[in-house]
Amino acid sequence: MNPEHVSVEERPTPTSFQGISSFQYPLVSPSLGTFQAGFEDRYEFQRKQKIIGNAIKRMIEQGLCGVEQLKAYLIELYRGNCRPNTLRTHAVTIGCFLFFLKGIGLEALKAVDRGVIGGFVEQQQDLGLSVNTIHVRLRGLYSFLKFLVGRGELSAEVLTRKLRMQLPKSLPRAIDPQAVRKMLAVIDHVRDRAIVLVLLRTGMRIGELLDTRLQEVDLNEQKIVIMEAQKTRVGRVVYFSEDACAALRQWLAQRSEQSAYLFHGMGRARLGYEAVRCRFERYLSQAGLSENGYTLHSLRHTCASELLNAGMRLECLQQILGHSCIEMTRRYARLTDSTRREEYFRAMELIEKGEVDGHY
């Protein structure tokens, strides 16, 4: 697609679906020069366009109301440079809501009120979705409704007294030190060992590590520059330990120079998440840890917990993990804190000796 060669008059109408899935109409002003970016930027734009096109196609095929509003909203997110997964999540959320409206006989979005939103939440609960999933969908739905209110297509009253989900405050699942040693003992693949150790010592998200390019790694200073964080889109610097550095050196001596990325697969310039996840689960199985519920993200939790127990301040840990809010980092203080543990047993020792006076 070259939007500079397509005029506004050539956009397909909603009744004529031809070309929407491949986006034969401009999403942005030609003057923006969107597709003058690098190859990877163009690839991401094309992914976004395909996601939007497929979503609109499904809505039309199912005969749902609000297709035009959905298209306008997704294009607004596109122009805001949302990530492909964000676009997909919003498209799925709004698609589910529009399908719900069809099921209860509503044919126009202007009829949506608090009761309708409540009915949608109840339907999602009846489907057995987790509270977190419903919470994400509810937030996405209100974002869509706010967009419609701004366009004057919906009463602002729908945004008053919003429904809110009470979310469980679960603890992060970190890997016990003994389990970490058992897992590392069975990893005999040079690349895989480097991946696990870097995740374990830096607290990086797996997506951030797979996006890391070779020039962003500094072995001398033992640091990795994350140009753009996967979730917050804010860059940061993380550091890795001696054992991770040694594992990286072994991998760099074997890796192919054809790939620009730090980690690559066999015959592929880039390593995919699914391949890493499958190999990680295989190592867990070999170590007898497959029943513990550990995931790749548990390596990030483990890194945070160990740094906190080693005395790192929460504010510093927040910067390393790339949390936008320190409350996210504070979860690890609830998970385990050696200082709190020591104070508890010191106090309990006095209690057990009967050295505490007072009336209750």
Image (spheres, helix red, strand yellow):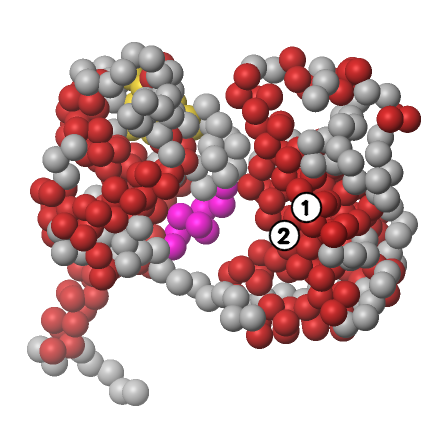
Please say whether residue 244 is visible from this viewpoint.
no
The amino acid on which the numbered mark 2 sits, given as a three-letter code, is Val
Q: Is residue 326 magenta?
A: yes
**Residue pointed to by mark 1:** 55
Residue 272 picture location, percent across and down: 38, 34
Q: Secondary structure at mark 2?
A: helix
Q: Position of residue 47 (x, y in %)?
A: 59, 32
Q: Nearer the viewer, residue 278 or 119?
A: 278
Corner quadrant of residue 32:
top right
Dot label at residue 92: 2
Left or right placement of residue 190 versus residue 123 in this view: left
Question: Which image quarter is the C terminus in?
Answer: bottom left
> Position of 163 compared to 340: left or right?
right
Left or right: residue 172 versus residue 99 is left
Depth check, mark 1 against mark 2: the one in front is 1
Circle 1: residue type: Ala
Report the front residue among 262 and 17. 17
Q: Are marks 1 and 2 in contact (CB under 8 Å)?
A: yes
Which of the pair 87/217 is nearer the observer?
Answer: 87
239 in the magenta segment: no
Query: What stretch of residues is rendered in magenta?
Result: 324-331
Q: Quadrant of the N terminus?
A: top right
- Residue at the spot x=74%, y=52% of the render? 61
Which residue is pictured at 20% across the width and 22% down the height? 251
Using the numbered discs, state the Cα–Cα distance from disc 1 to disc 2 in whole angstroms: 8 Å
- Tell me what residue is drawn at x 34 percent, y 52 percent: 332
Taking the image as shown, residue 269 lies to the left or right of residue 302, namely right
**Residue drawn at x 20%, y 81% as measured from the top left:** 357
Q: Earlier in the sequence, mark 1 or mark 2?
A: 1
Q: Position of residue 153 (x, y in %)?
A: 88, 52
Magenta span dominant secondary structure: helix
Q: Which SS class for mark 1? A: helix
